[in-house]
Image (cartoon, rainbow, N blue to C red):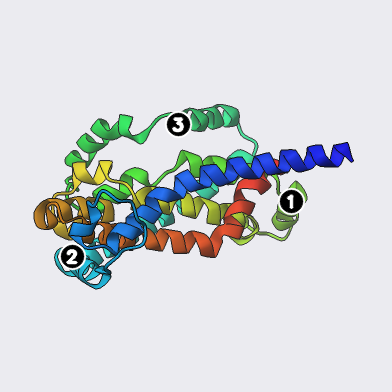
C-alpha cells in the first residue's frame, strides 16, 4: 500500500510540474488571443481579465487584414518555408544515407563536422552569408532567404540517426534487385523514415516562418517580406500603438503553425523518439 501511495505521489508531483510549466508556456498565447478580441481602451484597464467585456474582434481582425498586406506576408512565408524544406530534404536525405549506410574514408570526420555545425548559430554566419548574397546579386530576392538554408546540419543528423536504425538487410536486398543508391534513398529510406521527415519538416517550417533576423538583413521590399518581418513593418507603418490589430495579426500568423502541429503531432513525436530509442 505504501508503495502505491509513493507512486501516486510521484505521479501527482510530475503532473503538477507539467501543468505549471504548460500554464506559463501557454499564457502568452492566451493573452495574445484575448487582446486581439478587446477594444483599445479595455486593454489598458488596471483590472486583469482574459474575457473581453466588449468584443472588438471584427474591427481588429479586419484592420489586420486590410491595413497591411498580411495575406501577402503569409503567402511569402509559405513559399519560402516550402522552398527551404524541399531543398533541405533533397540535400540532407542523400547525405544522411551516406553517413549511415555507406563505408568510405573520412565518414566519421564528416559526421563530426556535422555535429560541430550543429553548435554554430546561424547568426554567427550572417556576415559572410550577406557578402556572398551580395556577390551573387540576389539581395532583396526570394533566393536570398532560401539558398543560405538549403543544407541543414540538424536535418542530416536527425535523418542519419533514423536511417541507422533501418536494418542493413533491407539495403542489401534493394541492391541485389538492382536499385541504385539514390533509388534506395528516395524509394526505401525516406518512406520508412517518414516520422523523422515530418518532425524535421515541422522544425524547419517553424524556424523559418518565425525568422526575423535574416529577412531584416537581406529583404527591403514589402512585397517579399515573410510574416515575422511583415508584422514589424505593419506595426511601424500603420498601427502605431493600436495593439488590437497587431495582436490579431499575430494570431493569424501563429495559427497555421498550431494547426500544422496538431495535425502532425503523432508523427512528430514518433520522429523524435524512434531514432533515439532504436
Q: Which class describes the residues within 10 Å of circle 2: few (<14), some (14-19), or many (20+)? A: some
In the rendered image of this protein, does residue 246 appear above or below residue 8? below
Q: Quadrant of residue 82?
A: bottom left
Q: Label 1, secondary structure: give it.
A: helix
Please report contact status of discs 2 and 3: CB closer than 8 Å, yes or no: no
Q: Which mark is residue 172?
A: 1
Visible in this render: residue 87? no
Q: Label 2, secondary structure: give it.
A: loop
Q: Which mark is residue 34?
A: none
Circle nearer the viewer, 2 or 1? 2
Q: Position of residue 158 (x, y in %)?
A: 56, 43
Which residue of the protein is positioned furthest toward the left in this rendering?
A: 237
- The answer to whether residue 57 is left or right of residue 117 is left
Residue, disc 2 = 69
Circle nearer the viewer, 3 or 1? 3
In the rendered image of this protein, does residue 49 appear above or below residue 18? below
Lower position in the chain sequence, tag 3 or tag 1: 3
> What is the C-alpha distance between the residues marked 3 and 1?
31 Å
Q: Quadrant of residue 265?
A: bottom right
Q: Quadrant of residue 192?
A: bottom right
> What is the C-alpha distance between the residues marked 2 and 1?
53 Å
Please report contact status of discs 2 and 1: CB closer than 8 Å, yes or no: no
> What is the C-alpha distance between the residues marked 2 and 3?
36 Å
Report the residue at 32% width, 43% height from top: 148
Circle nearer the viewer, 2 or 3? 2
Q: Quadrant of the N terminus?
A: top right
In the rendered image of this protein, does residue 275 appear above or below residue 176? above
Visible in this render: residue 266? yes
Q: Position of residue 201 (x, y in %)?
A: 48, 54
Please report contact status of discs 3 and 1: CB closer than 8 Å, yes or no: no
Residue, disc 3 = 117
Report the residue at 32% width, 29% height from top: 124
Amino acid at each position: 500500500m505504501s508503495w502505491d501511495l509513493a507512486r501516486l505521489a510521484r505521479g501527482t508531483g510530475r503532473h503538477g510540474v507539467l501543468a505549471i510549466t504548460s500554464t506559463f508556456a501557454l499564457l502568452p498565447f492566451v493573452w495574445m488571443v484575448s487582446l486581439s478580441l478587446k477594444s483599445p481602451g479595455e486593454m489598458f484597464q488596471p483590472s486583469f481579465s482574459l474575457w473581453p467585456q466588449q468584443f472588438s474582434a471584427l474591427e481588429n481582425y479586419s484592420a489586420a487584414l486590410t491595413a497591411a498586406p498580411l495575406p501577402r506576408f503569409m503567402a511569402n512565408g509559405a513559399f519560402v518555408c516550402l522552398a527551404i524544406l524541399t531543398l533541405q530534404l533533397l540535400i540532407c536525405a542523400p547525405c544522411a544515407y551516406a553517413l549511415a549506410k555507406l563505408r568510405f574514408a573520412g565518414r566519421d570526420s564528416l559526421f563530426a563536422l556535422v555535429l560541430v555545425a550543429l553548435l554554430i548559430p546561424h547568426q554567427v554566419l550572417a556576415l559572410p552569408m550577406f557578402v556572398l548574397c551580395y556577390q551573387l546579386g540576389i539581395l532583396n530576392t526570394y533566393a536570398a532567404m532560401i539558398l543560405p538554408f538549403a543544407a541543414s546540419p540538424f536535418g542530416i543528423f536527425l535523418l542519419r540517426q533514423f536511417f541507422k536504425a533501418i536494418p542493413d538487410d533491407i539495403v542489401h536486398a534493394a541492391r541485389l534487385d538492382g536499385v541504385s543508391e539514390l533509388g534506395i534513398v528516395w524509394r526505401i529510406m525516406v518512406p520508412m523514415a517518414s516520422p523523422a521527415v515530418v518532425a524535421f519538416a515541422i522544425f524547419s517550417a517553424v524556424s523559418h516562418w518565425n525568422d526575423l533576423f535574416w529577412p531584416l538583413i537581406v529583404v527591403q521590399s514589402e512585397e517579399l517580406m515573410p510574416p515575422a518581418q511583415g508584422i514589424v513593418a505593419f506595426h511601424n507603418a500603420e498601427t502605431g500603438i493600436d495593439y488590437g490589430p497587431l495582436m490579431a495579426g499575430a494570431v493569424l500568423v501563429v495559427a497555421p503553425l498550431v494547426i500544422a502541429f496538431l495535425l502532425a503531432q503523432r508523427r512528430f513525436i514518433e520522429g523524435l523518439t524512434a531514432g533515439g530509442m532504436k
